[in-house]
Amino acid sequence: FECIAHTQGVAAAAQELEKWVNQYRYKDGSYKCTATNMNDFIDALMVQRRIELWGEGLVFFDYKRLNLPVIRKYAGSNYASTMQLNSYAGYVAPWMNYIISEYERNHNPAVVIGPNTSGAITP
């Protein structure tokens, strides 16, 4: 659906998402995707992906690709207090990145270091 949104437009993608959700989840045809722009469509799509793929770990890649914020600190959160961190929208949460040591960077010319994301979370 995301590919359709990028290649054919949000309206076409919203129509396809509606068709899929109404065929496989809401048999009464009650689901309506009201997204009119890419950000709203991504939000609607991610809700459906979270429902469909809950517990499978597949949305991990969506969060990284789309730079979605990870929200773990909220009223009623069941995360341990030391893990209740929120990342900023537009940045990959730092704990989702693989860290390459400076030793490797200094001794392997193929390693390219990305930006410093240490300031991308709020406690």
Image (tube, rainbow, N blue to C red):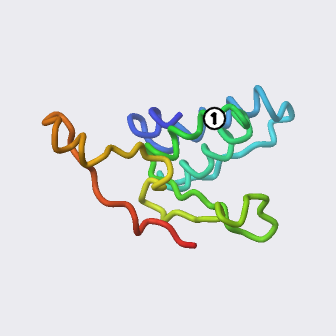
* Res. 83 image quadrant: bottom right
- Residue at figure coordinates x 72%, y 36% from the top left: 55
Above or below, 32 against 37 in this view is above
Residue 57: % across, % down = 63, 35
> Is any atom of residue 37 visible in this view?
no
The quarter of the picture where residue 23 lies is top right
Q: Residue 10: horizontal and vertical position, in percent?
A: 49, 44
Image point (17%, 34%), residue name: 110
**Nearer-the-camera pick, 71 or 19:** 71
In the displayed structure, 13 sits above or below 75; it is above
Q: Residue at x 45, y 33 (%)?
A: 3
Q: Is residue 80 left or right of residue 93?
A: right
| Residue in the image at 24% along x and 40% along y | 104
Residue 86 pos. (x, y %) = 58, 65
> Counting other residues with Cα less than 10 Å from the Cα at mark 1, is it few (<14), some (14-19), or many (20 or more)?
few
Quadrant of the drawing holding the C terminus: bottom right
Q: Which residue type carries mark 1?
A: Gly
